[in-house]
Image (cartoon, rainbow, N blue to C red):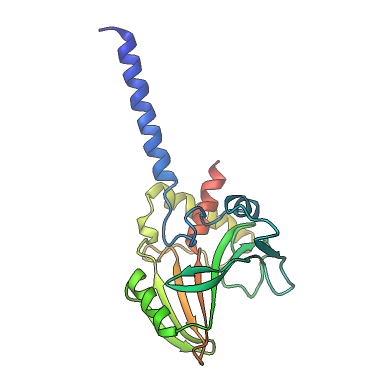
């Protein structure tokens, strides 16, 4: 048997294995941040470049004293869940607040906030249930009715290698002052919430990056 076909076959096998490995490594878990091109943990520059944002179609609001987020507010309205909405992308500036329950890594897309006004609350809620399924919980607090959908992907959905890397990066972040980064197998990767004001005239839908942001951070540490 000629050595050339054998060597060529080996190279093809190695290429396939490398592609499969990359696919697993780059798997996105949980709910995506609304726009297909975005992934959790993207930097401010990456978000701006990916969505081709300019001063004409978006405004960047720098963090205030009581906030640790840059806010990218898109000028155009978008239709989501059958209703027009204003889109805000929240990106951490890296400051850790003692009042924050969770403190995300530096310069990372960690939440998407949709603001609704002049809409039918029943229609929005019904459309979300049709797309996301039955909510995992619902309650009423000072901000109004809060409905939560948790992702089907759990911490246990990660491979052993991914969980090991995630745990190591969380330990590193906790050593720097971050809080509540204990991994639990049954924890959802992230969630989407719907908050409807008491008068039913305003609503906020929030996509939380949650663990998906830390997964991205742990991957970047390896690169």
Name the residue located 35 percent from the left edge and 24 percent from the top edge: 12
Nearest to the observer: residue 139 or residue 48: 48
**Could you tell me residue 76's position as x and y percent?**
59, 66
User: Which quarter of the figure is the C terminus placed in?
Assistant: top right
Above or below: residue 130 compared with residue 53: below
Nearest to the observer: residue 8 or residue 205: 205
**Could you tell me residue 61's position as x and y percent?**
70, 67
Q: Is residue 42 left or right of residue 9?
A: right
Q: Quadrant of residue 18?
A: top left
**Could you tell me residue 145's position as x and y percent?**
46, 86
User: Which quarter of the figure is the N terminus placed in?
Assistant: top left
Above or below: residue 203 compared with residue 132: below
Q: How many marks?
A: 0
Q: Is residue 99 left or right of residue 204?
A: right
Name the residue located 49 percent from the left edge and 54 percent from the top edge: 215
Q: Quadrant of residue 24?
A: top left
Name the residue located 45 percent from the left edge and 65 percent from the top edge: 190
Q: Is residue 39 left or right of residue 4?
A: right
Q: Residue furthest top?
A: 2
Above or below: residue 60 compared with residue 45: below
Nearest to the observer: residue 146 or residue 76: 76
**Could you tell me residue 38's position as x and y percent?**
52, 55
């Amino acid at each position: 048997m000629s050595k050339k076909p054998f060597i060529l076959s080996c190279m093809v096998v190695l290429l396939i294995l490398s592609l499969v490995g990359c696919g697993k490594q780059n798997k996105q878990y949980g709910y995506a941040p609304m726009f297909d091109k975005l992934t959790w943990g993207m930097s401010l520059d990456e978000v701006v470049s990916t969505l081709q944002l300019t001063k004409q179609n978006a405004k960047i609001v720098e963090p205030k004293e009581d906030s640790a987020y840059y806010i990218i507010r898109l000028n155009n309205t978008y239709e989501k869940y059958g209703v027009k909405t204003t889109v805000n992308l929240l990106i951490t500036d890296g400051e850790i607040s003692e009042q924050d329950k969770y403190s995300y890594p530096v310069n990372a897309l960690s939440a998407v906030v949709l603001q609704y006004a002049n809409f039918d609350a029943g229609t929005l809620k019904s459309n979300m249930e049709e797309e996301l399924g039955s909510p995992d919980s619902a309650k009423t607090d000072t901000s109004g009715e809060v409905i939560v959908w948790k992702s089907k992907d759990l911490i246990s959905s990660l491979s052993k290698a991914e969980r090991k890397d995630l745990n190591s990066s969380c330990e590193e972040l906790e050593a720097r002052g971050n809080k509540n980064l204990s991994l639990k197998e049954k924890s959802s990767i992230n969630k989407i919430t719907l908050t409807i004001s008491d008068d039913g005239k305003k609503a906020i839908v929030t996509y939380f990056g949650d663990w998906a942001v830390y997964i991205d951070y742990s991957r970047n540490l390896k690169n």
